[in-house]
Amino acid sequence: MTNGFYLQNFLYLYSRNKHVIMENTRIKLSETVMVIDAAYLNFVINDLKKYFEPLLGRSLQRADLALFTMCLAMDAGVKEGSNDVQILLVYDEQSGKLEDCLPSDLKSELDGMAFKGPLGEFCFMAVSSEGFVSRGELYLDLLHIVLNSAEVKKLIVVPFNEEYGEEVENVLKESVVESAGQKGNAKDIVFFRMEKPVTPVAYRWEILGYPLMSALGIRSEDLQNN
């Protein structure tokens, strides 16, 4: 609830004066934070369904969002324990629902909700760009805030790579350069994407498709048999 209070305060101030909030407002964040573009999840899941359903000869289940976020965390190196994982779901007017996920409605079903699992507690917050800036601009602003937060030790990013991925890469590169040699300030950054980076990057990256396939009920034997 504490983290939710700080972030709700952030959104109120954001709508009033973007520059003041970026410079002067301290936001309480967890040690592990995911920043996920909801539109990108819809985009990738739709592509996976189009590819795998004809291949497997069956309809895929709706993605279990709790399982998906736990798989993301595990692939990013989060171990079993009492971790606090904060999930910021960035969306706009067109992406207020995760079309093939359960739960799906960001505002009424996910915002402020949490669940506990073997890795710890996962808390969701839906962050809308509507009436403020574009979804990509809000994502980048949140990225800056999380990178500047001393509380955050691990950052998991799932941006809409095809739309503003280059800007995200530049922000992450600058952060890695600035924190070089400052062991206490360096963050473990994990970028989830669907393809290998074209050029070498200074942070970790993982394939987004694997945790999504698990959440959609695609099993290893499905892949072996096709």
Image: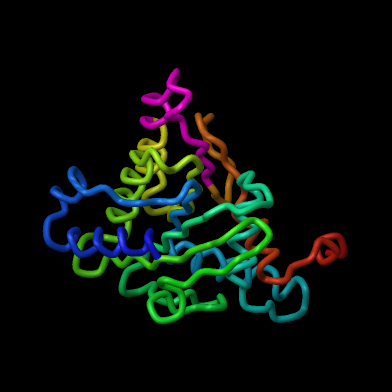
State which quadrant residue 128 falls in. Answer: bottom left
In the image: residue 118, left or right of residue 197: right
Against 174, residue 71 (above or below) is below
Examine the structure image and report whether residue 221 is included in the region drawn in magenta: no
The magenta-colored residue range is 174-191
Examine the structure image and report whether residue 175 is included in the region drawn in magenta: yes
Image point (61%, 73%), residue name: 63
In the image: residue 63, left or right of residue 85: right
Image point (52%, 37%), residue name: 188
Q: Position of residue 172 (x, y in %)?
A: 41, 36
Q: Nearer the viewer, residue 141 or 81?
A: 81
- Total number of numbered discs in the rendering: 0
Q: How is the protein colored in the picture? A: rainbow
Find the residue positioned furthest to the top.
181
Q: Position of residue 163 (x, y in %)?
A: 38, 54
Image point (31%, 74%), residue name: 93
In the image: residue 175, left or right of residue 25: right
Quadrant in which the C terminus is drawn? bottom right
Q: Position of residue 76 (x, y in %)?
A: 61, 46
Quadrant in which the N terminus is drawn? bottom left
State which quadrant residue 179 falls in. Answer: top left
State which quadrant residue 70 falls in. Answer: bottom right
Against 92, residue 208 (above or below) is above
Against 158, residue 176 (above or below) is above
Image point (48%, 23%), residue name: 183
